Image (spheres, rainbow, N blue to C red):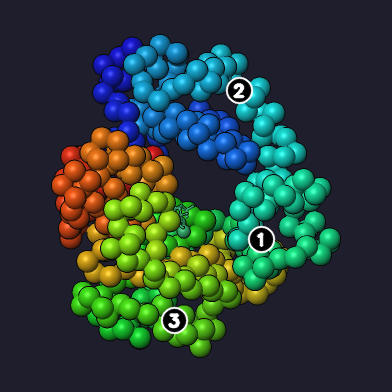
Amino acid sequence: GDATAMLIKSYACQRRTPLKHHNSFLTEALEILAQNAEYNDNEGRSVAFRRAASVLKALPRRVRSMEDLRCLPCLGDHSQRVIKEILEDGSSREVESTRQSEQYQAMKALTGIFGVGVRTADRWFREGLRSPDDLIRTGQQLNREQQAGVQYYDDLQKPVTKAEADVISDVVEKAVHAVLPGAEIQLMGGFRRGKEVGHDVDFLITHPEEGKEERLMPKITNWLEEQGLLLYQKTTRNSYLEKMDGPARASSNMDRFERCFSIFKLQESAASCKSNCSASAEDVSAAHEHHSEASGWRAVRVDLVVSPYSQFAFATLGWTGSKLFERELRRWAGQEKHMSLSSHALYDNKQNLYLRAKTEEEIFAYLGLEYIPPSERNA
Ligand code: CTP
Ligand code: MN
Ligand code: MN
Ligand code: MN
């Protein structure tokens, strides 16, 4: 074992995890097993594989032998077996057979539909359905969200680029400022962590004058709809009440902000079209013919969340991710600090009080953690 390996802390929120690391050949394999465990409704097993993968992402160099893993936390027997096989044979039989399995591939295709979770996908899989096409062919009952998911499936499968996220940011900013001048908009999720592509674009919206943000979302979506920029939207009202939801429920995963899960109609500029098609500047119109639909626009998933100013720091921390980083923050708060952390608040269960914060830095400090910037929360 080397000295650096021994410095790896056991909670992901105690570590710096950059976006680019040295062990994707191992982490991708472990994450397939994590994903498969999730498809089989085995959350404990899934989290164990994700924690193991995450530790390898934080290592300063490529793992070359089992010796390099001595003293590392979170590596269970099963993960170690998989790693050993990959180091010795170049691949793991369990990972490869999972990757090729009909269940894994069907669950991936079905849960890849917007609005379809593991439970629904599993039911469809048991009924013999394997793909979005199978759902259409057999005339499955779909809710409004799933209908949109099937309709825009191909577009929503394509990664969203940072350039596209920036265009959407401008659109969202324009919409928000049209209906509430002085509101603040922040890009969240993977793009805030420095990712170059994402599966969607996430935004957090607030206003420095508490109360101004109430019932803001319907105004935003109305404006967007009038401009013809929305293909789908579902808005949920804010249902957070500190007295009722605070300490008891603060560790619950799902927050209660006013939010909107949407699909934007993104106009594709000649420039982005050109780069997508890798055609020359003069050849943009010819390049269009490579597209299955030469429509000039694409569908993009966008999440909008509105937070009261007093909760903005918690909402920012909670919507930056990664999902594992968030999970580990809550686990650290509960197990090590006897506190309950949510995207709304931090509650100290020993002092029986809420800890107020204006910045993410203050929240890390309350939790007794070194501040980790968004670009190093890619756990
Ligand atoms: N989140 C949440 N509640 C949800 C969905 C998401 O609090 N119902 C949070 C997640 O915990 C995460 C952030 O929102 O911190 C972004 O989630 P998501 O968009 O799913 O993932 P990204 O990290 O942005 O990755 P991707 O690029 O795939 O979008
Ligand atoms: Mn996202
Ligand atoms: Mn999202
Ligand atoms: Mn094109």
Residue 339 located left or right of residue 131: left
Residue 338 located left or right of residue 82: left
Quarter where residue 2 is shown: top left
Say which residue label 3 marks.
218
Amino acid carrying label 3: it is: Pro
Camera-near label (1 vs 3) is 3
> Residue 90 or 276: which is nearer the viewer?
90
Say which residue label 2 marks.
91
Q: Sequence-wise, which precedes: disc 1 or disc 3?
A: 1
Secondary structure under the numbered disc 3 in the rendered image: helix
Measuring 47% from the left and 30% from the top, which residue is drawn there? 48
Measuring 26% from the left and 78% from the top, which residue is drawn there? 211
What x and y, as percent, mark residue 55?
39, 29
Amino acid carrying label 2: it is: Ser
Measuring 43% from the left and 73% from the top, which residue is drawn there? 237
Say which residue label 1 marks.
154
